[in-house]
Image: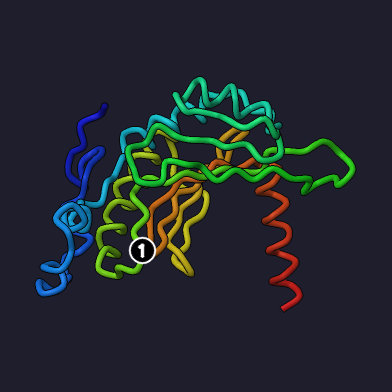
């Protein structure tokens, strides 16, 4: 297993403790094993995330559900489930939520075959109800965005700061985004056709306003 290193380096485990502000009187009432879990550092796996981005850029996408099995084999991920409409995809990243969120639908043609729209995966642990980690998540986002930009080989197509921080690269047959929320940093691989469909919808909404 990959040995984690500190946040700000190519991949790592941050030094922020999830329970940094927990009152000592509360800790005294918690069994030792639970106390240790509270003080687990937030894990970050930039190395494997960048490796997945590189694999995605080199992959021959058709944006059908069949791509998931081929890409999983290339990336070292695990695909399970017999229902092609609801696949279970697990990454190899060393974080507390290694599962990927997969979107399969009929965005362009309701009568056509299902299309792989996008899928996303976490690069950090998912941290709940702890605003103090926001600065750390921003640091991870900055480092990851810089490394992904290096792999892509050109500047971002788009960047935004509200309601989340994010950056997007359009490459042949693939759209890559890096996003940070209040809980984690994650990467999304998007079908260019699905991205175009979303972009057109956004333009229509802006015109209507």
Out of 110 and 19, give the one closest to the viewer: 19
Q: How many marks?
A: 1
For the point 64% across and 45% down, which residue is it?
103
Instruction: Relative to 20, say whether 86 is above or below.
Output: above
Instruction: Relative to 70, say whether 118 is above or below.
Output: below
The secondary element bearing badge 1 is classed as loop
Out of 209 and 127, give the one closest to the viewer: 127
Side of 84 where 71 appears, left or right? left
Which quadrant is the N terminus positioned in?
top left
Give the x, y percent position of residue 42.
Answer: 25, 51
Q: How is the image coloured?
A: rainbow
Instruction: Relative to 55, say whether 42 is above or below.
Output: below
Instruction: Relative to 115, say whether 108 is above or below.
Output: below
For the point 60% across and 29% down, which residue is it?
68
Which quadrant is the C terminus positioned in?
bottom right
Q: Is residue 16 visible?
A: no
> Which residue bears the numbered disc 1?
128
Side of 55 where 61 appears, left or right? right
For the point 30% across and 70% down, which residue is it?
131
Out of 101 and 200, give the one closest to the viewer: 101
* Residue 174 sits in quarter: top right
Give the x, y percent position of residue 150.
Answer: 36, 36
* Residue 18 sits in quarter: bottom left
Side of 121 where 67 appears, left or right? right
Label 1 packing within 10 angstroms: few (<14), some (14-19), many (20+): few
Give the x, y percent position of residue 128.
Answer: 36, 63
Side of 50 where 106 appears, left or right? right
Q: Is residue 74 visible?
A: yes
For the point 44% across and 24% down, which residue is it?
76
Give the x, y percent position of residue 3.
Answer: 20, 31
Judged from this view, the residue extending furthest toward the bottom is: 209
Judged from this view, the residue extending furthest toward the right is: 111
């Amino acid at each position: 297993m990959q040995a984690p290193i500190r946040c700000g380096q190519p991949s790592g485990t941050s030094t922020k403790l999830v329970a940094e502000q927990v009152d000592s009187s509360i800790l005294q009432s918690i069994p030792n094993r639970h106390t240790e879990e509270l003080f687990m550092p937030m894990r970050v796996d930039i190395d494997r995330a960048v490796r997945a981005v590189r694999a995605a850029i080199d992959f021959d996408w058709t944006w059908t559900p069949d791509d998931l099995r081929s890409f999983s084999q290339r990336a070292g991920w695990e695909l399970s489930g017999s229902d092609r409409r609801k696949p279970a995809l697990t990454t190899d990243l060393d974080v507390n939520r290694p599962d990927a969120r997969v979107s399969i639908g009929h965005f362009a043609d309701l009568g056509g075959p299902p299309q792989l729209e996008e899928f996303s995966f976490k690069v950090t642990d998912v941290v709940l109800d702890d605003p103090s980690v926001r600065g750390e998540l921003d640091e991870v986002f900055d480092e990851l965005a810089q490394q992904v930009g290096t792999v892509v080989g050109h500047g971002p197509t788009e960047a935004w700061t509200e309601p989340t921080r994010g950056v997007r690269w359009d490459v042949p047959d693939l759209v890559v985004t890096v996003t940070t929320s209040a809980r984690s940093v994650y990467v999304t691989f998007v079908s260019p056709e699905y991205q175009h469909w979303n972009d057109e919808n956004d333009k229509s909404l802006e015109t209507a306003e």
